[in-house]
Image (spheres, rainbow, N blue to C red):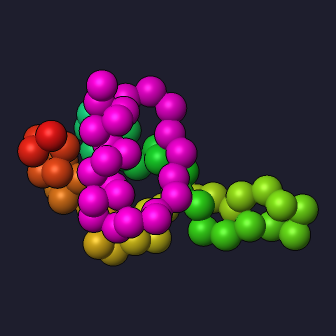
């Protein structure tokens, strides 16, 4: 399943990274919709952004890792 490939790919590039997404991540446009966890609010909810804060995780690198799987 592509969702598993995407998750595996991002964890290969950066272990312990936290992100959420819905559906399959098959294109760069899909990649831009990923919610990256950047912290935890005082009420315990995740602080997320669709702006990727991880310079080592790019669509090109993720796609290359997914193609290996």
Tell whether 23 sits left or right of 55.
right
Is residue 55 magenta-colored? no
Residue 18 can be seen in this image: yes
13 lies left or right of 31: left
Residue at image location 32% in from the left, 42% down from the top: 6
Q: Residue furthest right?
A: 43
Quick check: 8 above or below 53? above
Indicate the quadrant containing the N terminus: top left, top right, bottom left or bottom right. Answer: top left
For the C terminus, give its image quadrant. Answer: top left
In the image, taking residue 66 as reference, residue 51 lies left or right, namely: right
Corner quadrant of residue 27 = top left
Asked whether 15 falls inside the magenta stretch, the response is: yes
Q: Who is closer to the viewer here, 10 or 30? A: 10
In percent of width and height, residue 39 lies at 67, 70
Please tell me whether residue 28 is drawn above or below residue 43 in the rendered image. Answer: above
**Please, is residue 53 above or below residue 45 in the view?**
below
Which residue sits furthest bottom? 55
Q: Residue at x 74, y 67 (%)?
A: 40
Q: Pinpoint residue 22: horizontal percent, then vertical percent.
A: 50, 32
What is the span of residues highlighted in magenta in the rendered image? 1-24
Residue 23 at x, y = what percent? 44, 27
In percent of width and height, residue 21 lies at 50, 39
Q: Please give the name of the residue rendered at 54% of the width and 45% of the height, measured from the top-left corner.
A: 20
- Does residue 29 appear in the picture of this structure? no
């Amino acid at each position: 399943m592509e969702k598993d490939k995407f998750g595996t790919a991002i964890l290969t590039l950066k272990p312990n990274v936290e992100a959420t997404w819905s559906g399959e991540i098959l294109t760069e446009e899909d990649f831009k919709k990923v919610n990256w966890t950047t912290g935890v609010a005082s009420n315990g909810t995740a602080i997320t952004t669709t702006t990727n804060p991880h310079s080592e995780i790019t669509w090109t690198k993720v796609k290359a890792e997914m193609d290996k799987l």
